[in-house]
Image (cartoon, rainbow, N blue to C red):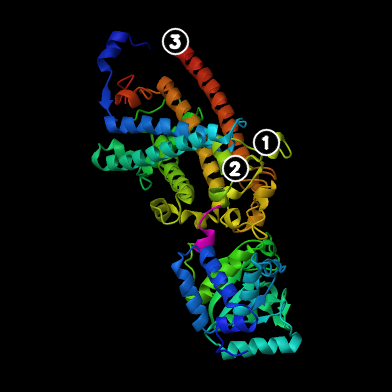
């Protein structure tokens, strides 16, 4: 592939018509929440800018991010983005394997040093010198550091790369560590989710390629355009929440009516993601739409926050089933009994004193 | 020995301790805490579902409105209370500053502990808070309120949205705790700490009013500390 090719040239070569190309541009502008005059700017950028090479590394992960990514809802978006990003290395998707694949990684790093985007799926385990994840014959953490050294920016795909996810759940025997704690000198864009929504992934990458800059990030390094609001804030069942109408137990009448899943442990109120607006599988549905609460998969440490059906975290120091409310209520009960006993003792003591005073 | 009422009457002393703004703050704060506790509990554990069209109901909405309003009033009056610590009499500062380097103060703390453990026969007189009360006021009222205000406004900022002043002032609290759910857990725990404080506080105030040598409950109404005898 030539590094002089523009996005547009590549697309045309792949048989995409001008009409389809412009459709893609308007779709992208809409997906990124931009005004219509950006359609032209996106089209212009794609016609003039050379494609940015992307290296896609896989660490300790399950490939659900890739699975999600290749299902990017609009078929056109899928085709275009896959050709657009000049995916020079992705050991799962690329045709090459073994030494050829590793050679292409090295070639890309060398050729585009300082200019490529590094997308990381999964995370490196640091325990035992990183021996829990070996790719291409060496610990993944070494490969990651090597590839990150020449990267312009790093995208942390999914909850694994962003927070640690299941392999970093307590007690985290392999010491799986999120990317931003291993690569400290580069901007890391977190795109959490298990997996992240396909359109969110393509949206982030398209934004970076067309505007040649990082999307605006929130305090925790997530793109604001997709992670600035909670599932709850845009949930279509929100009116039932405000009205005080809840599913009381699974499969009850209220569940059939589609009431709010707050009482059966929906984590929508504490989860930042775009599921309730973008939805999944070409906008077909999302967990709440299918009658199940949100598990909070895009939140930090979601495996360690107790049951998937609890909105407050269990506090295991006080028994397996204790949460803040059971613990608090118990403590308040104990305090109440303590006060009653103390009051009774005080009364007795006082009665004794009055007696002795009168003597 | 029994002192007859008339002789006693001549020796009864009263000191003006709590000025009007401080007393007003106390009762406004008390009301807010009660509202916040009840509505907070019901937000976390909602009442049984309402029926009918969603648009005809707004139970959770009202609950949250009451919670947020009381939270705002509590936070603003707490700021007012801090202001009063600067301009009020010296009792108004007692809650905020612990004389932890004062050996005598610590002795009094332990004395009060012994008094509550029935190991002391007669309590001491204090014009302001007794040292043990001062200690608990500092930890529960001052630090407790700050904790609840910060975690509360951090969660409020989630709804207010990024870039809102609540987010800019308090949004950093969420990553500090980990994530939103951890802040919720901490806020719930904080509520229970406040509930236990309230229970102990009300009990101790009534008990002291009866058993100590000075007034407690009426002092927070009139501002005057009355002493039941004129011994030291």
| Left/right of residue A338 with respect to residue A129 in the rendered view | left
**Which residue in the structure is indicated by mark 1?**
A254
| Left/right of residue B139 with respect to residue A198 in the rendered view | left
Q: Main secondary structure of the magenta part?
A: loop
The answer to whether residue B41 of the structure is visible from this angle is no
Query: Viewer-nearest of labels 1 and 2?
Result: 1
Residue B18 figure quarter: top left
- Which residue is more in the foreground, A65 or A211? A211
Image location of residue A15, percent across then percent down: 65, 80
Which segment is the magenta one? A220-230
Which mark is drawn over residue A324?
Answer: 2
Q: Is residue B74 above or below residue A287?
A: above
Image location of residue A121, percent across then percent down: 65, 71
Q: Chain of mark 3?
A: A
* For marks 1 and 3 on the same chain, the one whose residue lies earlier in the sequence: 1
**Which residue in the structure is indicated by mark 3?**
A358
């Amino acid at each position: 592939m030539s590094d002089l090719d523009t996005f547009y040239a590549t697309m045309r070569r792949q048989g995409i018509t001008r009409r389809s190309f412009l459709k893609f541009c308007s779709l992208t502008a809409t997906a990124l929440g931009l005004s219509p005059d950006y359609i032209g700017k996106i089209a212009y950028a794609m016609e003039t800018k050379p494609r940015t090479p992307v290296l896609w590394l896989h660490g300790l992960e399950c490939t659900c991010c890739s699975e999600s990514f290749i299902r990017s809802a609009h078929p056109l978006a899928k085709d275009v983005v896959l050709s657009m990003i000049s995916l020079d290395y992705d050991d799962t998707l690329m045709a090459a394997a073994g030494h050829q694949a590793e050679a292409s990684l090295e070639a890309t790093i060398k050729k585009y040093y300082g200019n490529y985007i590094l997308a990381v799926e999964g995370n490196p385990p640091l325990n035992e010198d990183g021996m829990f994840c070996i790719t291409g014959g060496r610990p993944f953490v070494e490969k990651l550091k090597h590839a990150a050294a020449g990267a312009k920016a790093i995208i942390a795909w999914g909850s694994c790369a962003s927070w640690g996810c299941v392999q970093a759940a307590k007690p985290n025997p392999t010491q799986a560590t999120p990317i931003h704690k291993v690569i400290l000198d580069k901007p890391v864009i977190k795109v959490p989710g298990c997996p992240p929504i396909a359109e969110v992934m393509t949206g982030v990458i398209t934004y970076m390629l067309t505007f040649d800059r990082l999307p605006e990030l929130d305090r925790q390094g997530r793109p604001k355009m997709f992670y600035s609001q909670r599932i709850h804030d845009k949930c279509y069942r929100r009116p039932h929440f405000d009205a005080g109408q809840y599913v009381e137990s699974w499969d009850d009448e209220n569940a059939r009516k589609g009431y709010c899943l707050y009482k059966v442990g929906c984590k929508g109120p504490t989860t930042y993601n775009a599921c309730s607006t973008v939805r999944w599988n070409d906008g077909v549905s999302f967990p709440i739409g299918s009658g199940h609460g949100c598990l909070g998969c895009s939140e930090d440490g979601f495996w360690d926050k107790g049951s998937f059906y609890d909105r407050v975290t269990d506090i295991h120091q006080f028994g397996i089933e204790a949460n803040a409310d059971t613990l608090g209520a118990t403590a308040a009960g104990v305090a109440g009994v303590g006060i009653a006993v103390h009051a009774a003792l005080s009364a007795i003591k006082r009665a004794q004193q009055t007696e002795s005073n009168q003597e | 020995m029994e002192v007859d009422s008339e002789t006693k009457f001549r020796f009864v002393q009263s000191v003006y301790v709590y000025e009007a703004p401080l007393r007003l703050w106390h009762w406004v704060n008390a009301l807010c805490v009660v509202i916040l506790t009840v509505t907070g509990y019901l937000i976390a554990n909602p009442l049984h579902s309402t029926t009918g069209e969603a648009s005809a109901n707004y139970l959770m909405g009202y609950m949250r409105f009451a919670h947020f309003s009381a939270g705002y009033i509590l936070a603003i009056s707490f700021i007012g209370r801090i202001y009063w610590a600067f301009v009020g009499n010296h009792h108004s500062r007692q809650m905020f500053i612990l004389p932890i380097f004062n050996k005598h103060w610590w002795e009094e703390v332990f004395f009060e502990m012994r008094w509550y453990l029935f190991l002391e026969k007669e309590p001491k007189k204090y014009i302001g808070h007794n040292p043990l009360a001062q200690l608990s006021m500092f930890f529960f009222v001052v630090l407790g309120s700050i904790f609840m205000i910060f975690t509360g406004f951090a969660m409020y900022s989630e709804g207010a949205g990024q870039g809102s002043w609540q987010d800019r002032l308090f949004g950093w609290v969420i990553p500090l705790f980990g994530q939103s759910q951890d802040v919720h857990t901490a806020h719930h725990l904080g509520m229970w700490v406040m509930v236990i404080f309230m229970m102990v506080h009300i009990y101790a105030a009534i008990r002291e009013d009866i058993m100590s040598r000075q007034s407690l409950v009426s002092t927070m109404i009139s501002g005057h500390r009355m002493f039941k005898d004129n011994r030291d």
